Amino acid sequence: MTEVVVYRLVLALVFAVAACGEPRPAADASASLAPEAGTGSHARDLGCGPQICAPGAALRATYEGAPATWPAARIDADVAYTELAALPRPARDGNDDQADSAALVALGEALFHEPALSRSGQISCASCHSPELAFTDGVRTAFGHDRQRGRRNTPTVLDKAGQPHFMWDGSAASLETQAAGPITNPVEMAAEPDRLVARLAARPAWRARFAKAFETDAADTAAAQATDPVRFERVTAALAAYQRRLHRPTAFDRFMAGEHDRLDDQQIFGLHLFRTKARCANCHMGARLTDDRFHNLGLHYYGRAYEDQGRYGVTGRPADMGAFRTASLRHVGDTAPYMHNGLFPTLVGVVNLYNAGGARPSPRADQAQDPLFPATSDRLRPLDLSRQEVEALAAFLEAL
């Protein structure tokens, strides 16, 4: 426990220096605050706050134009960048080959709120993914069966249609697989599939709903439909169908649709920083605001209490030790706390981490020759963001 406390204190000191230390001039003109501004942004008050933000006002007309006319994003040469965009609502037309039926989605919604899916009969999916909390739980890491505490933060399940892999370590390749994970995890819902199915099948109302939702399944005979409508793979299929449908438009979506008053001048400035000086768009891009890759931010606690090996636990590749999936930033303002371990309660704290160039723990003497000791991604580097820039960037994140 002492090691963890010390590690947190070191991180806190790094963030304090990044946020409050003596500002230095920007290294080059590409770090400018407006398309035509010069260097030296740290040497003066930028005139940017929640009420009045001069650089944001200067950039507004530019960012109210089509993305093709925006200033060039500051992207590393090896990154295949996709420009930021609004996320369209998932298909709802029953004639769409990719759309799930209304009955299947309705069944999935009912199951999502059904505590019978857990061993104790007291925990539902919504216990950790509450619709009132943007489908998260608002705590550092989730509590599950017998009040056991998990090791990872609960991500939102909003806007997951089209995502190629799930879980912080990418261990689930589909929403169906993802749905099965928490249900059977002994720390989370701790259910046994056969017993779960028997519990649901014992209730005529559930049997009727399953039969209705899967009545067009060509792989099933009429007899099987009548005798065995409830199956575990159908439970996960229904849950996946419901989660694919979950979508909430954001202020940024509406801004991109032409409602330009959805972002204030401070947030416009934050948008510009996001794409340029702050380098966020190297990993958070496109409509879903993620590159769907895995990166090491230095928050792995390797060889310490609360160690989490991240992607390495799935692939066994040394390069993946301590790496985690790039989380989508959609709804990020409503889904605190942050990171895979939930150690960051505020967006300003997250921005300070990146401003400092990430966490860079050093190996102990006994780890000096350890080939698995994780290296923080070289995508992260000190940013020299001023306090006003940090606050503007955090304000923009609130709109995503």
Image (cartoon, helix red, strand yellow):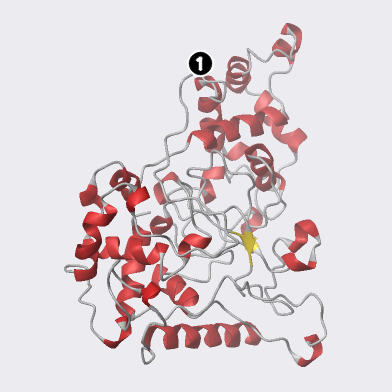
Residue 15 position within the rendered picture, expressed as x and y whole percent measured from the top left: 46, 82
Quarter holding residue 362: bottom right
Residue under the image location 75 percent in, 78 percent down: 373
In the depicted structure, whether residue 252 falls above or below residue 358: above
Residue under the image location 23 percent in, 49 percent down: 260
Residue under the image location 67 percent in, 73 percent down: 306
> Which quadrant would the N terminus be assigned to in this image?
bottom right
Camera-side residue of 193 and 306: 306
> Under tag 1, what secondary structure?
loop
Whether residue 168 sits left or right of residue 309 in the image: it is left
The residue beneath circle 1 is 95
In the depicted structure, whether residue 165 falls above or below residue 372: above
Quarter holding residue 17: bottom left
Q: Residues within 10 Å of mark 1 (few under 14, many from 20)?
A: few
Residue 44 position within the rendered picture, expressed as x and y whole percent measured from the top left: 25, 85
In the depicted structure, whether residue 102 falls above or below residue 123: above
Camera-side residue of 291 and 101: 291
> Which quadrant would the C terminus be assigned to in this image?
bottom left
Q: Amino acid at mark 1?
A: Asn
Camera-side residue of 180 and 292: 292
Q: Is residue 326 visible?
A: yes
Residue under the image location 46 percent in, 59 percent down: 138
Q: Is residue 150 visible?
A: no
Residue 220 position within the rendered picture, expressed as x and y whole percent measured from the top left: 74, 13
